[in-house]
Image: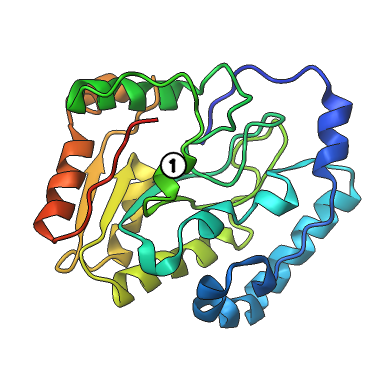
Amino acid sequence: MKEQFNMFTDEQGAKDSALAAIELSASCLPKDWQDQLKAEFDQPYMQSLQDFLTSEQNQGKVIYPTDDQIFTAFKLTPVNDVKVVILGQDPYHGPGQAHGLSFSVPTNITKLPPSLKNIYKELNADLGIPIATTGDLTSWAKQGVLLLNAMLTVEAKNAGSHQKQGWEKFTDHIIQLLSERCDGLVFVLWGAYAQKKTSLIDEGKHLVLKGIHPSPLSAHRGFFGSTPFSYINQYLNDKGKSVIDWTL
């Protein structure tokens, strides 16, 4: 996600907290996801990604999110509980903003990202849910909304900096895996980048919601008024699944 807004002033403190060595291994995942993804961590591209991240850290570059939060989405949303996938691009690149969930920021971030604010506006217009003051979407994740970024890490203050290093292949595999092994999921693809992932999804088995990105640069071209949240819940209800309580 390529937005820049309020950052903490304590840059050194943020740097120190982000320099823990990143280790990419299946042991970083809960067991249910390990069973599905263990072999992927043995692929050469994952070793290349590990080497890239190690090199970046050895050069003193700060990487977000912190190593213990890279796989937060998988820890909060068990593979068998996934009902909705909301795909983002890459993590926020300011101190303390990224915590492993697409479009989400931790509770201590008081100035919300512009795209998230627009998501809340559409949620309010769609379902009448009050606009939240927190940007933490953990409660969605715990209900089966996999908040997945295409890239799971980013260099501080450098949006998109970890593109084409291997993360996309890993997350593409996850999208294909879910498409193949599950039935009746909703894949939310906002913006041109996310919509390129349509080819990975069996549209005969799943609902693919393709729409305008909620960024302030594009939201007025069709994101507002698209009622995605009611579409999602109606589809889940039709499939006999519990709907998402979007209230925060």
For residue 134, above or below residue 83 = above
Disc 1 secondary structure class? helix
Neighbour class for label 1 at 10 Å: few (<14), some, many (≥20)? some
Q: Position of residue 234 (x, y in %)?
A: 12, 46
Q: Quadrant of residue 181?
A: bottom left
Left or right, 20 with respect to 144, comes to: right
For residue 101, above or below residue 236 = above
Most extreme residue toward the left, as rendered?
Answer: 238
Residue type, numbered disc 1: Ser
For residue 1, above or below residue 194 = above
Residue drawn at x 31%, y 36% is 246
Q: How is the image coloured?
A: rainbow
Name the residue beneath numbered marker 1: 139
Q: Position of residue 70 (x, y in %)?
A: 64, 53
* Quarter placement of the C terminus: top left
Q: Position of residue 202 (x, y in %)?
A: 23, 68
Left or right, 192 with respect to 55, comes to: left
Residue drawn at x 66%, y 50% is 69
Residue drawn at x 69%, y 20% is 7
Can residue 215 be seen in this snapshot? Answer: yes
> 229 or 153, which lies in front?
229
Left or right, 100 with respect to 230, comes to: right
Q: Position of residue 134 (x, y in %)?
A: 49, 24
Can residue 217 be seen in this snapshot? Answer: no
> 198 or 103, which lies in front?
103
> 53 or 129, which lies in front?
129
